[in-house]
Image (cartoon, helix red, strand yellow):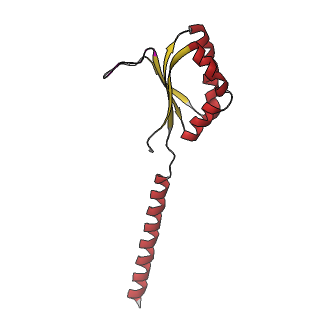
Amino acid sequence: MKQAATLALVSLAGFALGAGAVQGLHAQATKTALAYAVAEIEVTDPPAYQAYLGKAIESLKPYNAHIITRAKPVAKEGPAPQGIVVITRFDSLADAEKWYSTPPYKELIAERQKAAKGRFYIVEGVPQ
């Protein structure tokens, strides 16, 4: 009888450990990946771009987004973009898409396009 109780207790403990491990793996699998807005910018009207930049930075605050680089790239392969590369980090792809497609930033896109030329991307990061 004692052996049956021990076996039942060990089995229950094994089940609990297995369930905990599965929950941990599930939590990792569903963790949201960061997202990045990447812009290659060649400023054509510096005063207009500076005016745009202040408003653009302010528009990031509700999304807890941060500019992580704004610099001239050093090309290692292929031609470097003219101007600078700006990379902005968002907590999720949904946040980046919402920021880009809703006011106030949506109204700033035309202002940026008048002050600079370049390319703009939103990409999802690798889940951590």
Residue 42 lies in the magenta-colored region:
no
Q: Is residue 13 left or right of residue 59?
A: left
Q: Residue furthest bottom?
A: 1
Q: Is residue 13 left or right of residue 95?
A: left
Number of residue marks: 0
Q: Position of residue 60 (x, y in %)?
A: 61, 29
Residue 82 lies in the magenta-colored region:
yes
Q: Position of residue 16 (x, y in %)?
A: 46, 70
Instruction: Looking at the picture, tell me which residue is in the foreground, 31 or 7.
Output: 31
Q: Is residue 98 visible?
A: yes
How would you classify the magenta stretch by its main secondary structure?
loop
Q: Is residue 50 left or right of residue 5?
A: right
Q: Residue at x 64, y 27 (%)?
A: 105
Instruction: Looking at the picture, tell me which residue is in the foreground, 89 or 14.
Output: 89
Q: Residue at x 65, y 27 (%)?
A: 106
Looking at the rendering, the stretch of residues picked out in magenta corresponds to 78-83
Q: Residue at x 44, y 62 (%)?
A: 21
Up/down of 18 relative to 5, above or below: above
Q: Position of residue 2 (x, y in %)?
A: 40, 88
Q: Is residue 104 left or right of residue 14?
A: right
Q: Where on the picture, by quarter, is residue 45?
A: top right
Q: Is residue 53 visible?
A: no
Up/down of 125 relative to 30, above or below: above
Q: Position of residue 51 (x, y in %)?
A: 63, 13
Q: Where on the picture, by quarter, is residue 93?
A: top right
Position of the C terminus by quadrant: top left
Position of the N terminus by quadrant: bottom left
Q: Where on the picture, by quarter, is residue 90?
A: top right
Instruction: Looking at the picture, tell me which residue is in the foreground, 26 or 4.
Output: 26
Q: Residue at x 59, y 38 (%)?
A: 95
